[in-house]
Image: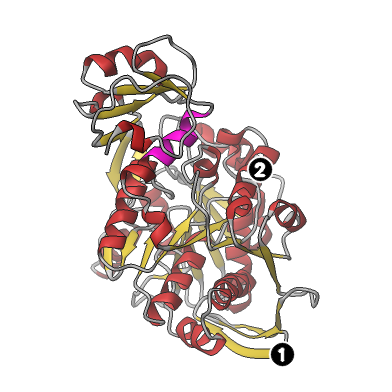
Amino acid sequence: MRLSELFREVEFDGSIKNDADINFVTDDSRLVRPGSLFVCIRHRSFDGHTAALDALASGAAAVVTQDRLGLENELHVADSRAAYARLCAALCGHPERKLRMIGVTGTNGKTTVTTLIRNILSDSGAKTLLTGTVCNRLGDENLPSGLTTPKPPELYSLLSRAVSQGCKACVMEASSQALAQGRLEGIDFDAAVFTNITRDHLDYHGTFENYLSAKKKLFEHSAVSIVNLDDPRADEIIAAAKGKIITFSTVLDCADYTAKNISLLSDRVHFELISKGHIEHIEFASPGLFSVSNAMAAVACAINLGIEPKDAAQSLAKSKSVCGRLERVECSAPYSVIIDYAHTPDGLEQVLRALRPSCQGKLIVIFGCGGDRDRSKRPLMGAAACRYADKIIVTSDNPRTEDPTRIINMVLEGVRSEKTEYVVIENRREAIRYALNIAKKDDVVVLAGKGHENYQEINGIKHPFDEKIIVAEILEDMRCGRK
């Protein structure tokens, strides 16, 4: 595609002196080759503007800058991140305009809600692309996932592939970082879903208000906004929304969709979805009140995309639990083992609250906090665990480049002030072994924080760590009398 054609919908200063044929757009100077367009982006640890000259020397036809550098073949834009996304979209022929685009954002529930929407659309006959934390799924094909929301080159390559393979829709998790970085710039969404917002990612955003502002961006470019009215900040999301607003609630009758006759069972939820002139019985195989909210979000979105309520309900009833989200580990032990991704104070509290009513024995939770992330939430995680667990085992999560002991001590600030029994075992595998050894009949052991992740990141290295495999290995050791 000619450079001039690539910039047809992107405003810039300067003149195109070399209307070269562009076959690659990148913000990574190491990937520049002849025929490339290099976009200078200020990253946290590297400013792409410092590599502009090298990019031109490596064969880039032009460089896109946000800071004026005075270079030949320089095209200046107001926001290089936004331009980057739009240029990648243009190079791929704007596949986002050939799909129904559905975005889901919130602190918790994104993976579950996107998966449920994907299942409903697929069951209706619409081949659908799912992008998210656990995996990218094109129809029935699972593809690897790096970031919750892919960077523009990967995202548009994926969307283009989806179009070529006959997909009709894309359901994506829209992370706050992606929204703040303009990765979704230029996409007009058919529907956007707000699940909830609690404290998270403040290491990146700095303040909760910045975090919330990033979330709002999704609803500024959506034809329909599906909003959880139970969240205290719902009114701010609604105020930011530009299109039609649809609300749902587990308690408020003023919402467009309300849940009535809620039944919270040990492994599922039942409720009636009430809307104007319609009642639909909903069953979803995941426990807890938050599962009701997730199910409501998915069904309300699907209905407003034209799916019949009864068809949406039937699809939901056969949907299985999502990988690493309240996932029961199949084992022959006399107690239950649950794996969940809960890594925020609210997420951990919601999971333990969901499991508490059906736990006939002790509720044992193993958790830690990630390194190089928001440190202020660590004692809050400890306090959240104390509210519902009978025994707490504080361990390591992904320490990354931080000292695991220091992270644990910060978690303990929120534990020591409570009366809940706790123990510290830094080695996560040994923490799991300890929990499985002390658990008795009818206890519930919760492994929180890792969820779908099959690694543990320590000092920049990702070590294999699949908790389902580890649980199986430990239980086999116990069966054979091995310590």
Secondary structure under the numbered disc 1 in the rendered image: loop
Which residue sits at x=59%, y=57%?
222
At 57% from the left and 71% from the top, the residue drawn is 301
Furthest residue in direction left, as rendered: 34
For image coordinates 64% across by 37% down, the residue present is 376
- Other residues around mark 2 within 10 Å, as few (<14) / some (14–19) / many (≥20): some
Residue 474 visible in the picture: no
379 w.r.t. 105: above or below? above
> Residues at badges 2 and 1 in contact (C-beta under 8 Å)?
no
The percent position of residue 6, horizontal first and vertical second, equals: 35, 37
Query: Label 1, on which residue?
Result: 277
Magenta stretch containing residue 467, yes or no?
A: no
Q: Nearer the viewer, residue 475 or 117?
A: 117
The amino acid type, in three-letter code, at marker 1 is Gly
What residue is pinned by disc 2?
213
The kind of residue tagged 2 is Ser
Q: Over which residues does the magenta segment extend?
A: 79-87
Asked whether the viewer can see residue 243, the reply is yes
Which quadrant holds the N terminus? Answer: top left
Q: Nearer the viewer, residue 52 or 210?
A: 52
Q: Secondary structure at mark 2?
A: helix
Comparing 314 with 48, the one in front is 48
Single out the residue that lies furthest toward the top: 70
Q: Which tag, 2 or 1, sits closer to the chain's start?
A: 2
Work out how far the residue at label 2 is from the one at label 1, CA to CA, in angstroms.
Answer: 35 Å
When the figure is inspected, residue 125 is found, relative to residue 65, above or below; the finding is below
Q: Main secondary structure of the magenta part?
A: helix
Which residue is painted at 48% across and 14% down in the image?
68
> For the residue carrying disc 1, how many other residues have a C-alpha within 10 Å: few (<14), some (14-19), or many (20+)?
few
Whole-percent x and y of residue 172? 45, 58
Left or right of residue 157: residue 121? right
* Residue 420 image point, x, y percent: 65, 56
